[in-house]
Image (spheres, rainbow, N blue to C red):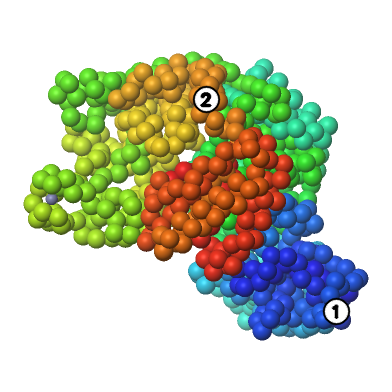
Amino acid sequence: MYAKVIVDVAAGGVDRPFDYRLKDAHLGVAAPGMRVLVPFGKRKLTGIIVELSDTASVKNVKSISELLDVTPVLSPELLDLGSWLAKETTCFQITALFAMIPAAMRAKAQKFLVLNEKANHVDVSVQALFGQRIKIPFKEIPEDKTILKAVSRGIQENVLSVYYELKDGAKHKEQKAVTTLQSAQQPKTTKQQETLATIERVADSGAVPVATLINDHGLSRSTIQTLIKNEFLEEHQIVIERNPYERQAGDGREAKRTLTHDQHVAYESIRDAVEERSSKPMLLHGITGSGKTEVYLQAIEQVLKEGREAIVLVPEISLTPQMVERFKRRFGDHVAVMHSALSSGERYDEWMKIHRNEVQVVVGARSAVFAPFNNIGLIIIDEEHESSYKQEDYPRYHAREVAIYRSQTHECPVVLGSATPSMESFARAKKDVYTLLSLPERVNKKPLPAIELIDMRDELRGGNRSVFSSQLLDKVKDRLAKEEQIVLFLNRRGFSTFVMCRSCGYVGDCPHCEISLTYHQRGNQLKCHYCGHEETMYEECPACESEHIRFFGTGTQKVEEELQKLLPEARIIRMDNDTTRKKGSHEALLKRFGNHEADILLGTQMIAKGLDFPKITLAGVLTADTLLNLPDFRAPERTFQLLTQLGGRAGRDKREGEVVIQTYTPEHYAIQHAKSHDFEGFFAYEMQQRRQAGYPPYYFICLITFSHEELLTAMKAAERATRFLKERLSDQSVILGPTPSPISRINDRYRTQCMIKYKREPNFSEILSELFTHYQQEVHKDSRFMAIDRHPNIFM
Ligand code: ADP
Ligand code: ZN
Ligand code: ZN
């Protein structure tokens, strides 16, 4: 028997399956989807079995050295998805496969086999391995077929689990627990007898944590100790799962709401699609506050009733405690949550719950699209227009495309939800490639908040140099007087502060990147946001030694100070990368705001979404232009989306909401359409622009970027790639370049690029993969050398 194994190329292999022989001990145990250690040249590499076969394609076949798993970590469906992903995104197959496995399993983690709580059905051979222990290093499992099989069965039956202990300290927690022992005698005192009786009842033939006995059953620790000492009880260490949402564990008891007419229509279409096993994607276009989430929740309930599973993707920043709580309240323990704020150990635990079929719903960011479910009935992508659904490193996939591919295998619909769908998705819905569902009204029938534009040019003419117009300030004061709440939005990028000499015009640039440094008040430092370079703020100009060197622009911190000066009585919470770096601080800040411990929430992008606080009656945008002026064809779309989302934060409850947008270009169509809440109008106008300029959705775009320490190497590579593509692509496709990238140097590496615009290139994947193979050696050595980005989001 042979196995075809994809080995870890990054460590020096080649991107194709290799044949390996199965040792006797591995026969009947080894299966596709398991990780293995195999000899490769003089070294041993990790790999993944993708297939078993009776024959080998070459003569001299080595044996697999070691099985790293005893049950597959990737199902046949995910193995297939991996090879599709590698082809679609042009990356190594192993990279695609590893992307679907939690990082904890990829890192150099120590692996343990754990005997689960209440496990008394484990095979004797396995029991013998454990002896008195509850946890043994994986390495202690002998290469013995019978034992391996028994272990594999134990894992499938959930009597055994595999745990990974990481160097990052994300160890699983251990707890003291007790089991009852058979004894001919009775404990001496009545109290001891009663205690033992309670434990016998609670323990139910398994181990109970001592903490549970004390906290939930009111037993005394000293009595338990005595019972242990007198051998009525036996003490154990048991492993409990890290549960990041312990504090808000739901009971699945939240009542569902009666759907409005529009919600009901949308719900029925989704339900029918689920029942008919249709995999035609659906676009749910519903304005903010129209009750999309409630539709998702009820559709998922239906899916669960049919014994199927659901994946819900939300952008990282909307994975607020509020959103998670809503799902926990509705589905209780049936939900796993996955996002990047979890430690890798916690992510692994959540993944494991899915893998072991302990949960039926996963709510998570981008990578949750790979959730190892076997019977998916529905995939939901909320805020589908968000750019965070695209991964900006190998494999450069878009969660939407992965979801659609999986949905075809599982025969289930994908529902894309948004108040401001991407141009691409809405265009597809218009052409009936996607089914269009609409929720045109807010649930509470309230109109969308009125949006007022304030022309900042007038303010400047009137002598106001502050970032706050007098109108905005008046409205803020008004809300403060009424004890209502306010959110103020500041675009991070546009507001970062740079340093300039007023005498000679010198600008503080990063010595390693073609980008200016940003001033940070904390520590009086200048930092590069691309490479992390830091230096102390200059006392005099490095070029002309003048003392008139200042920072310009406005950071969130500076705005906060200015606001506090203008409104000394206001309680302000600032939310940006600086104040939310610590784990849990994001939640804590929101909680304080929710409790009305502050009046104003001032922040960057991260406050634009998901907030649902009834007392917010005013939302303000400090300058709408900073996003608009980015050199990116999607800048108007992003501006429209952001303004609309932010408008959705105000007046969600009984009180009227109002939105104020400060701008230097009030006449811009993105701002005008946002003001009139006119998505269709914006879409029509923007589509014209896209058609004229030859951008998506009229054309596909692929961006190929090279980066290298030597300018010449980067230039030559881009030239060669351009020539290579010109020879192979059709005449209708346009190749722009080779040229230096907009940011021509990052981290002392020169960057060059070429861009392809095309309508139809049936062999495009093959051509790109040929190009990739050509540079395979370079990419092995340095994965940053070449980036092939199909459907790019970033053009810098
Ligand atoms: P969206 O996701 O479209 O922004 P939500 O699902 O968050 O909208 O709904 C907005 C608010 O309306 C929430 O507070 C939600 O609890 C409430 N809601 C949604 N559907 C209903 C309904 N059918 N009846 C009453 N309240 C509802
Ligand atoms: Zn100077
Ligand atoms: Zn730099």
- The residue type indicated by label 2 comes to Gln
Specify the quadrant that holds the N terminus: bottom right
Residue occupying image coordinates x 57% and y 33%: 696
Question: Mark 2 to mark 1: distance in Å?
Answer: 59 Å
585 vs 767, nearest the viewer: 767
94 vs 308, nearest the viewer: 94
Q: Quadrant of residue 439?
A: top right
Residue occupying image coordinates x 18% and y 36%: 565
Residue occupying image coordinates x 54% and y 15%: 445
Name the spot of residue 559 as percent of width and height, x first.
Answer: 25, 38
Name the spot of residue 210 as percent of width and height, x first.
Answer: 60, 67
How would you rate the neighbour count of disc 2 (Cα within 10 Å): few for under 14, some for 14-19, many for 20 or more?
few
Does residue 328 show up? Answer: no
The tag earlier along the polypeptide, 2 or 1, is 1
159 vs 38, nearest the viewer: 38
Q: Quadrant of residue 297?
A: top right
Name the spot of residue 432 as percent of width and height, x first.
Answer: 71, 24
- The residue type indicated by label 1 comes to Lys
Q: Please tell me whether residue 666 is drawn above or below residue 757 in the rendered image.
A: above
Q: Which mark is residue 59?
A: 1
Mark 2 Cβ inside 8 Å of ligand 1:
no
Q: Is residue 698 left or right of residue 141?
A: left
Does residue 627 show up? Answer: yes
Are circles 2 and 1 on residues that touch, CB within 8 Å? no
Q: Badge 2 is on which residue?
A: 692
Q: Is residue 653 left or right of residue 459?
A: right
